[in-house]
Image (cartoon, helix red, strand yellow):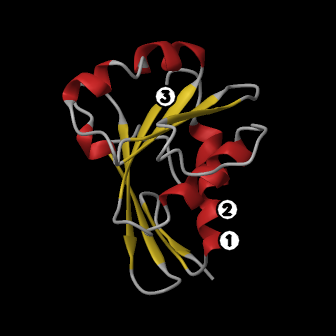
Amino acid sequence: MATTTLRELVTESAAQTEAAGERLARCLGRGDLVLLEGELGAGKTTLVRGLARGMGCRGEVMSPTFQLVRIYPGPVPLAHVDLYRVERTSELCELGLEDLLEDGAAVVEWGDRLEGFRTAWVVIEALDLNRRRLRLQEAPASWSW
């Protein structure tokens, strides 16, 4: 069973991490930007699967590492951005993040590479093979798991 505070949650499986994303999705709306921070394999894409499901988005959620941006249509479209392979600041400017936020919400993996946006952070820490600690940082006070 997962343990939680308003700003921190420990999940014990990928399914619980996905469910946490689904609950967090209730807080998201058009113009919201969530930056994800965590090591490779920490569960960033797993959390995004839950966000997309919670927002009523359609389509299979996969890591956009090679595509950079995937957009999942729904009542509020969700842009899923992955900055892992971005090496130059100019590439970040070409993302069109402002346009994506006008149309819907966005979640950015490897968000520590993005500067200059007022945003919420989710830090994902792998505690062991299955357990993850999810922390909301700099998010609106009304956001919780």
Which residue is label 3 attached to?
32
**Amino acid tagged 1:** Ala
Q: In what element is the residue under mark 2?
A: helix
Q: Residue at x 55, y 28 (%)?
A: 105
- On the question of residue 71 being in view, the answer is yes
The residue that mark 1 highlights is: 15
Secondary structure of the residue carrying tag 3 is loop
Q: Are marks 3 and 1 in contact (CB under 8 Å)?
A: no
Amino acid identity at mark 2: Ala
Q: Amino acid at mark 3?
A: Asp
Q: Position of residue 38 (x, y in %)?
A: 35, 61
Labels 1 & 2 near each other (Cβ < 8 A):
yes
How far apart are the two marked residues, 3 and 2, measured between alpha carbons?
Answer: 19 Å
**94 shown above or below 62:** above
Identify the residue at image location x=58%, y=50%. Answer: 48
The C terminus - image quarter: bottom right
Quadrant containing the N terminus is bottom right
Verify CB contact (< 8 Å) between mark 3 and mark 2: no
Mark 3 or mark 2: name the one nearer the start of the chain: 2
* Residue 23 visible in the current orientation: no
Secondary structure beneath dot 1 equals helix
Q: Specify few, some or many for label 3: CA neighbours under 10 Å numbering under 14, 14-19, or 20 or more.
A: some
Residue farthest to the front, as pictured: 66
Tell me the crowding category of disc 1: few under 14, some 14 to 19, or many 20 or more residues within 10 angstroms, Cα based: some
The front one of 76 and 60 is 60
Quadrant of res 94: top left
Q: Tag 1 or tag 3, which sits nearer the N-term? A: 1
* Nearer mark to the viewer, of 1 and 2: 1
Q: Residues within 10 Å of mark 2 (few under 14, many from 20)?
A: many
Left or right, 139 with reference to 18: left
Left or right of residue 33: residue 104: right
